[in-house]
Structures are given as structure tokens and as C-alpha cells.
Image (spheres, rainbow, N blue to C red):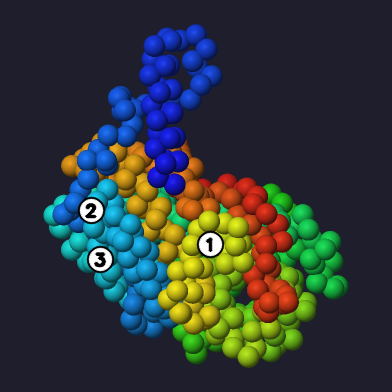
Amino acid sequence: MRKKLLLVLSILVLASLVLGACGDGDATDAPVVTDAPEGPAVTHCDDGLDGETIKYYYQAGLTGPLSTILGTTFVNALNDAIAEVNADGGVCGATVELVLTDTQYDPEQEVVIYQTNREDTPPPFVFNTAGSGATIALSPLVNEDHIVNYAAGLNAQAAYVPRDGFTILVAPIYSDQFAGFLKWSQDNWADVKPEGAGDDMVVGVIGWEGPFGAGATTPEALAYADSLGITVLDLETFPAAAEADVITPLQSLALQGANVIYIQSLGFGTAQVIGTLQGMELWSSMHVGSVNWGMNQDVLTVLGDSAGAAIGMYGLMPFAWWNDTDVPGVAQARAAFEAGGYPEADRGVSFLTAYVGVFAWVETVEATIDRVGFENLTGDTFFETLQLASPVSVLGVWEYDVSGELRAPTFSQMGQVQLTDSGIEFVVIEEWFELPDTKPAAE
């Protein structure tokens, strides 16, 4: 991907120079890159940075009640990927060092850790977070400091208010996902609706308490549902705890006539909803869907011997999956996973995305150094590289696209939990399609 990034940057630079020489004429029909660097696109990285260290920052919950969400699998992925990078010469010769810090997914700790790391010399230009609380709490800070936050907490407000922020999401915002699920379900209702459901969708959303659980049902997403003529009931929530009462909120949705259940939780929370729907004998009367994080191996692991209970659930899949063996990043991650001898329960989204994410970061860092020099590697110059080259493939597993005001991917696949010859798997049933736009209004 480094060659692709550098080629794209070279073409953009050449285009800007040609446009400048041609004057007005037909130039208005061609792409214009503002503030594009002049001169050769590849200069600095070949000089080598032997003896230098570039830190890869990642903060997440390694302990505490929610630590099982990611578990240790993503840590293995980070260590494996960084070891491979360093064995292959590092970043332009510089050694990559992992700085991994436990926040327990507590927003206050997320801020403290960020502020501590910010005082490093040199300061961070990019870091990674894994929860909605972190995305929201850190958004104003990274915007002020011009430090990029690659965030897995897909909060629309944090990414898009203001429009020129430094929070970049690794998957579509939750409201776009929900709107996409509604549109896809409505378009395919004759085929997917439960027996006796009728022609109209009545959607019950159940999610964890807090901003993540409320991430799907934003005013923009609800307005979109209304434009489709779809009824969305008031959000029902439950605590992110293994002993949470899920029966009461599901009973409430069923009594209000829900024939669609959309799950805005992940891990054990998604498993709780699946198991409870089955236990209440409501599964067959509901069209069940999930946010992307629910389409993950950890849900089946929690269900254990009852994993078959999830068969039939639909969900957004904005990443390539482990069974997409023709995707370069998947093949590379599979090789690393097998070489590490990790248990099958860890073959989930966390390992896959953390692993390939390191290589995407490396390629963008190298392209930035080539463009502006190591001494000018900052959040601003890193972000500019991404914008100049967008969309940027993450080894084929997904794409970053921060062109213009975009801060999150806008495409997804639709998947379903199915029983195959290989066992229970997440199977893509519709390839990449564009999601509805439910970005919040700019302030």
C-alpha cells in the first residue's frame, strides 16, 4: 500500500502543477488539490531513520468489567504486526514501539491517559481508541491539539461536530448503520419478514445504557426511518452487565408490536438479547439485526453450546471477514493468527482490524515522511496525507476515506449468521452498498 499511497500523491501533485500552468480553461473539470507540495513526492524516507523510534499509541480497557469486549486478542494482533514491521526494517528504518495503556473504558481515564501521552517528546500525531466514551470525551481535545484519533467508538456527533475534526472512525457511524439496516430490510421485506409479520416494519431497538446504546437512534436516523414510513419504537436499554435484565425491555417492545429487533450492543450484551429472545420464544416472530460489532466471534463464544441460537441474525459488516481469503489483509492476518497458535475463539474482528490497522498506519506514516520529512511528521501532515490519497485501503479489509468532510466509511456489507459446512459463520449476503447519510447538522 505504500507504493499505492506514494503513486496517488505523486499524481495529485502533478495534477496541481499542471492545473496551475494551464490557467482557467478546462481546469475546472479536473480535481484540484490545495496546498499540494511541489517537487518530487518521494525524497525523505529513502534517507533512512536508523536509531529513531516512532510510537504507536493505543488506549483501551485491558482490565475491569468491560475488558472482555476486546479481550487479549487485539493485544496479540498489535504485538505480532509491530514485530513484523520492525523485522522488515521498521518505518523508514525507525523502530516502532507500542505504547498500550489500560483505561478500563472509563472516559475520565481516557482523558488522563491522553493528556499524559500528549506530553511525550515528540508528542503523538496519531493514537487509537476503542470505545464511544473515549471518542466523545477526546473529540474536543484532539481537535484543539491536531492529533488524529483512530476511533472504534463510532459516535456521529464526535466525528462530525465540528466538520473539520481529527476523529477518524474505523467503520460507519452507528446511525448510518441503523439507517442502512432499515433500508435494506424494507427493500427485502418480502423475503426476510417473519411469518405473519404483515407489510409494515415496526422496529424495536435495544441497546446498552450510555452513548453507545443510543448511537443508532439519533434524530437524523429516526427522521430517515420516518421518511421510509417505518415505525421505530422508543429505545429500550439495559446495563452493560452479565446479570442485566433483558426480559423486561424485550417484553415491552414485543407488547408494542415490534416485528424487528435491532441490537445496539456487542459481546455478551448481544448474546444476552439473542438468548433471551430464544427463551421467550420470540425469535421466530422477529427479524433480528445487529450493529457491526455484534457480528463477531465473541458473541458465539459467549453463547457456547447454544451458539446455534444466533443463526438467522442479520447485521452490518463494514469489514472483510476471516472467510474472505482472497483479501490480502485477511490472508496476512490468518497467517499471523495461525503462526501465533491462538485459540479459535480469538478469531474475531478485534484481531483482524488491529492487525491490519498497524500496516495501514505504517504506510501512511512513510508516505507522510516522504512528502514532508520526518521532522515535519505531525497530526496535520499525517491527516493531509490521508486526505490527498483518500480513499486508502487497509490491506483490502476496509477503507479510510477522509476526503472533504468525511470522517467515517459510508459503505457496508450485509451479513447473516448461517450454518455452513464449516460450522456457524458470518456470511455476506449482499456485497458493498452505500449507507444513507445521517450525519448530524454542523454547528
Which residue shows up at 27% across the image and 65% down it? 98
Q: Amino acid at mark 3?
A: Val
**Callout 3 environment at 10 Å: few (<14), some (14 to 19), or many (20+)?**
few
Residue shown at 29% from the left, 74% from the top: 102
Q: Which image quadrant for residue 40?
A: top left
Q: Disc count in the image?
A: 3
Disc 1 residue crowd, few under 14, some 14–19, many 20+, Cα 10 Å: many
Q: Is residue 413 above or below residue 49?
A: below
The residue positioned 23% from the left and 58% from the top of the image is 95
Residue 443, compared with residue 355, is above or below; it is above
Task: Report, in whole angstroms, how far the alpha carbon at label 3 lies from the one at label 2.
Answer: 15 Å
- Residue 427 in the image: state x and y as whole percent: 67, 67
Q: Residue at 42% of width from left, 64% of height from top?
A: 354
Helix or strand or loop: what does disc 2 sit on?
loop
Identify the image quadrant of residue 124: bottom left
Answer with mark 3 or mark 2, whichever residue precedes in sequence. 2
The disc at residue 99 is 3
Q: Indicate the amino acid at tag 1.
A: Val
Q: State the image quarter where residue 101 is shown.
A: bottom left
Quick one: 84 or 246, which is closer to the camera?
A: 84
The answer to whether residue 426 of the structure is visible from this angle is yes
Res 123 visible: no
Sequence-wise first label, 2 or 1? 2
Provide the residue designation for mark 2. Answer: 94
Give the x, y percent position of residue 317: 60, 61
Q: Nearer the viewer, mark 1 or mark 3?
A: 1
How far is mark 2 from mark 1, CA to CA?
A: 26 Å
User: Dot 1 corresponds to which residue?
Assistant: 330
Q: Nearer the viewer, residue 75 or 329?
A: 329
Judging from the image, what secondary structure is the residue with disc 3 in?
strand
